[in-house]
Every structure is written in C-alpha cells, then in structure tokens.
Amino acid sequence: MRLKTVLNDFHSTLDEYYGKDEVNSFFDLLMEHYLKIKRIDLALNPKYEIDTEEHELFFKALQELKLYKPIQYIIGETEFYGLPFKVNEHTLIPRPETEELVDWIIKCHTERSDESPRILDIGTGTGCIPITLAEHMANAQVFSIDVSEEALQIAKQNAMLNDVDVKFIHDDILSPHHTELSEAYNYDVIVSNPPYVRDLEKAEIKSNVLDYEPHLALFVDNENPLQFYKAICEFAQKYLNEGGALYFEINEYLGQEMIQLLNDFGFNKIELKQDLFEKNRMIRGFK
C-alpha cells in the first residue's frame, strides 16, 4: 500500500478530532518512528510503498488516536529539553512548563559558584527533570526519588539512554522516614513537580490526559491540595543546605497559597514565576 494513501486515511478519519495540522504532526512522528523517514522523503517519493506489517502499525495508531490516546504513549517516546525520553502508562508525559522550570534552575546555576551542587528531584516520573539537570550541569551530583517502582524503571532507562549519572531511589516523600535520602548528605537544590491537580479540576482535564496518564502523579484531594508541598518543605528544612534553593512546579490557581506556605516554613527570596502562557506555574525560595 502507498504511504500517501495511509496519510489520506489519517486525515479523513482524524481531522475532525484534531485538525489537519496536528494530524500531519502525528503522521510525521509515526513515519519517523516506524519507517525511519521524514516528510521530505514522502514528498520526494509520493509512491512510497509500505508492507502489510507496517500498514498494521499505522492502522493501530490511527485507531488509538481516534480514542485520544496520546501520540507519545503510542510510540513510547517523547522529547524534553532537546533530549529523548521513553514514556509509558506509568509516567506522565513531560510538558513544556516543566521545561521552563528546568531552564530556570539551569540558568540560576550558571550564575552561582557551586562547584559540585547536590540536587534532589522528588517525584521523578520519566526522569526528565534530574536527567536534564545532570546533562546540563556537568559537575552536579543528582538524586531522584519516586513512589512508583515502574516509573523508576523507565527513569533508569532514560538515564542510560542519555548517558548521565543519576542515583534513583524508591521512596515516598509522604513517609516519615527517608534513610537512604538522608544518608546522601544535604542538598543544594531540591526540585519537585508533585501531584497538584485538585479533584474539582478534573472537568478541565482533556480526555487524552484523564483517560491515559497515571492519576497517582496527577491528582490530590480537594481538602489537602498542598500535602506534597508541605511534606517537601518539611524535608527541605532538615536536608537543604543553608542558602540552598527549593523549586516547585505548581497549580496555577494556588500561587498565593504557595507563597504563604514557603513563608510559613521560613524560606526567603520567594519568587513566583509565570510560564509562557502567563500562568503562575513555578515558585522558588531559599533557605
């Protein structure tokens, strides 16, 4: 079958769900993933043929896209801050606002004189935060924890994929004991993108996220939406070095509550930062 015919099938089936441009983007990713070719190759060879097995892969992807399954889960990979990452149903798909958080930390580091900062990421998922920091902060010692052993397996694969050294630890920040973490000495930077979407906000979440991404990494109770932030602040009081920085990605609706929380725990130089869409999505404080 001609690949061009498959592309036409994608448009006739999916344009009403996503729009023509996004369907083109999906098809480009699938061509590169399944066939190792790019759009220019199809343009130069409009009679490009695929075999039955290859057609089956595209057909399956089309059916999954029709059910709003994220393209990243279909191909099992994505890109974050220019680096490749494997993803699966046990990990959130890394997002642009998290890239902005990482960029903030990297730029802050270049302005500091730390020779070998110790960095702890809490709630690793794919490992996108600690791996990217390890890649761009060559002298850093990077540690990362997650409560999900399945997520840690993916994170370890991603560290190998990107050839960086990150120590991954199975731990729950809500637990009162953190023996392995505390034995790793104090930290100069602690960063976290914890669950922060309140149950009352589920109506705002698109089905491709709600139906496929792990709820454990997304949602918190309406009554205690800052429970992870409180636990991390308590941990940081013990294990963040004096002058060390605490970074969070946050719920856009809870910026003022986060400022108050960091104040309550004695952090100073608190800065609430907006993302590219002018939403309050990041905060930083110093011990």
Image (tube, rainbow, N blue to C red):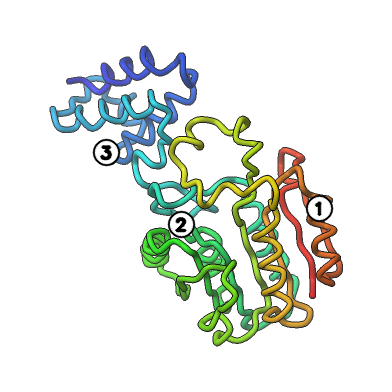
Decide if residue 169 is on the left or right side of residue 249. Answer: left
Q: Secondary structure at mark 2?
A: loop
Circle 2: residue type: Thr
**Among all residues in the image, which is located at the extreme front?**
223
Nearer the camera: disc 2 or disc 3: 2
**Residue at the spot 26% in from the left edge and 29% down from the top edge:** 60
Sequence order check, earlier mark of 1 and 3? 3
Q: CA distance from mark 2 to mark 3?
A: 22 Å
Asked if the residue under mark 3 is in contact with the one under mark 2, i.e. CB atoms within 8 Å, the reply is: no
- Tell me the CA gap for discs 1 and 3: 46 Å
Disc 3: CA contacts within 10 A as few (<14), some (14-19) or many (>=20): few
Amino acid carrying label 1: it is: Glu
Quarter of the N terminus within the rendering: top left
Classify mark 1: residues with Cα within 10 Å, few (<14), some (14-19) or many (20+): few
Task: Label 3: state its secondary structure.
Answer: helix
Residue situated in front as seen by the camera: 144 or 85: 144
- In the displayed structure, 75 sits above or below 129; it is above
Earlier along the polypeptide chain: callout 1 or callout 2? 2
Q: Is residue 70 left or right of residue 37?
A: right
Residue 162 visible here = no
The residue identified by callout 2 is: 126
Which residue is under mark 3?
Answer: 34
Which of these two is toward me, 139 or 274?
274
| Position of the C terminus by quadrant | bottom right
